[in-house]
Amino acid sequence: MHNKNFNMVLISIILSFLLFSCVSPAKRVSNISTQKVPDYQLTAKRLVVVSSVGLIFGSEFADAFHRKLEKAVNQSGTEIWIIKVQGAESDKQMYPGIVDDFQADSLLVIEKTESTRIEYSNSTFRIRYLAKLVDLSIDKTIWRANIDFSRTNYNIPVQERGQGLAVELVNKLKQASILDGDLLHYRGNSGFFVN
């Protein structure tokens, strides 16, 4: 009898573990490593973003990323103007009119540096981005981030992945005191969350 109860408990634990591991949402969309110029202080108030994020994963991903980025940056008290590009045209020299007209104090350029495809399906599952923040008053890069984004869990809608990536990026800017406010949390309808 003791052995039977032990087996039932053991089976219950194993089934619970398997169920939890199958439905447990990922907590991170990406791996972001950052560097900031030491002892440099800039809190962006008017930010222009030149972004090639999401184009490989499609418009649903890109639109969700950019909408969430705009909302999160605005909530921090910073005005934002986003320019979506294909990649090669992400050089700030191509947009002096917008930067000047918007009276931007800082520029964030996010460009794709690498992508990896699954051979048998020809779909991209990993992208690396480089983000550089420029203080426009001195025309100097004062912060940079290497972003390693993986699209490995196809059970999570692509829109939620885009929103999660925007939240992670904004949180890194807040940790560097470039944006004001508390760190953000995000929970999608599928249960996917970022904290």
Image (tube, rainbow, N blue to C red):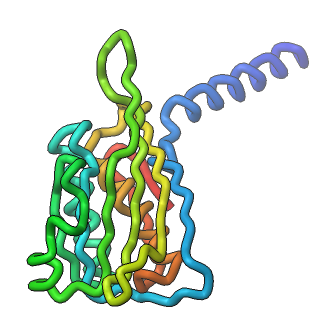
Question: Is any atom of residue 12 visible in this view?
Answer: yes
* Frontmost residue, 164 versus 39: 39
Considering the image in quadrants, where does the N terminus appear?
top right
Question: Is any atom of residue 77 visible in this view?
Answer: no
Q: Position of residue 139 (x, y in %)?
A: 35, 81
In the displayed image of the protein, which residue is found farthest to the top? 120
* Frontmost residue, 157 versus 64: 64
180 relative to 151, above or below: below
* Frontmost residue, 87 versus 188: 87
Q: Is residue 175 left or right of residue 185?
A: right
Q: Position of residue 135 (x, y in %)?
A: 37, 82
Residue 79 quadrant: bottom left
Q: Position of residue 123 (x, y in %)?
A: 30, 23
Residue at 26 percent across and 46 percent down: it is: 54
* Frontmost residue, 178 versus 108: 108
Residue 84 quadrant: bottom left
Residue at 21 percent across and 43 percent down: it is: 55
Number of numbered markers: 0
155 relative to 11, above or below: below
Q: Is residue 36 left or right of residue 85?
A: right
Q: Position of residue 32 (x, y in %)?
A: 51, 55
Q: Is residue 180 left or right of residue 82?
A: right
157 relative to 2, above or below: below
Residue at 16 percent across and 63 percent down: it is: 83
Residue at 35 percent across and 38 percent down: it is: 156
